Image (cartoon, rainbow, N blue to C red):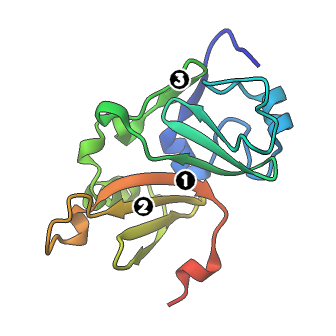
Amino acid sequence: MKLKTPIEIDILEFFKTAKFDYLKLGQTKEWILNNFPDPDCFGTNFLTEEVNIWTYGGIELHFENKKLYLIFSDYWYEGKLDSSRQLKLNKWIFEDVNQLNLLFVLTKLNKHNIDYKKKTDNLGVLLRLKSGVELTFENINDVEGLNSNGFQLTSFALVEENPYRWKE
């Protein structure tokens, strides 16, 4: 579906409520094609099982069995999260991704009263927001002895909760 004006997505609202226009996890590729703009790289076989990631600038929709299971971003070109022809992003804290260390993001989440769970392990830090959006932080430069507050945000995703991930 081609639109005359792009759909606006507010990243702060997405983090608070998981609202990404009318998209919900579990919707089919066909429903999304009929109710949401076409992805950036749109071909004739996007409904097939082989094409499982649709991109919109720096946002990806991931499908399994032709159903949406993940709204994801981990590619921030030249230090920022990109919009696309069909999506205009209100980027909130993503205007400059270089500032997105754990301490900075926690401060912003707390300022906006966004509740979260935090899990730290050998690989990094995972925050699961009350909305279902998960944020992953890592020691991207392998700095020895780096306090986890200095870990950088490497991805965010709306995904169903994996209860095994949160067991001690």
Measure the alpha-carbon separation of dots 2 and 1: 9 Å
User: Disc 2 vs disc 1: Cβ atoms closer than 8 Å?
Assistant: yes
For mark 2, give the secondary structure.
strand
Image side of residue 161 versus residue 77, left or right: right
Q: Nearer the viewer, residue 67 or 91?
A: 67
For mark 3, give the secondary structure.
loop
- Name the amino acid type tagged 3: Ser
- Name the amino acid type tagged 2: Thr
Q: Residue at x 60, y 24 (%)?
A: 40
Within 10 Å of disc 2 (Cα), the crowding (few <14, some 14-19, many 20+) is many
Q: Residue at x 65, y 27 (%)?
A: 39
| Residue denoted by label 1 | 157
Q: Residue furthest front?
A: 50
Q: Position of residue 18 (x, y in %)?
A: 62, 50
- For residue 84, the mark is 3
Q: To which quarter of the image does residue 42 belong?
A: top right
- For residue 68, the mark is none
Q: Earlier in the sequence, mark 2 or mark 3?
A: 3
- For residue 136, the mark is 2
Q: Earlier in the sequence, mark 1 or mark 3?
A: 3
Q: Is residue 102 above or below residue 72?
A: below
Q: Residue at x 84, y 27 (%)?
A: 34
Image side of residue 84 versus residue 7, left or right: left
Q: Is residue 47 above or below residue 164?
A: above
Quarter of the rendering occupied by the N terminus = top right
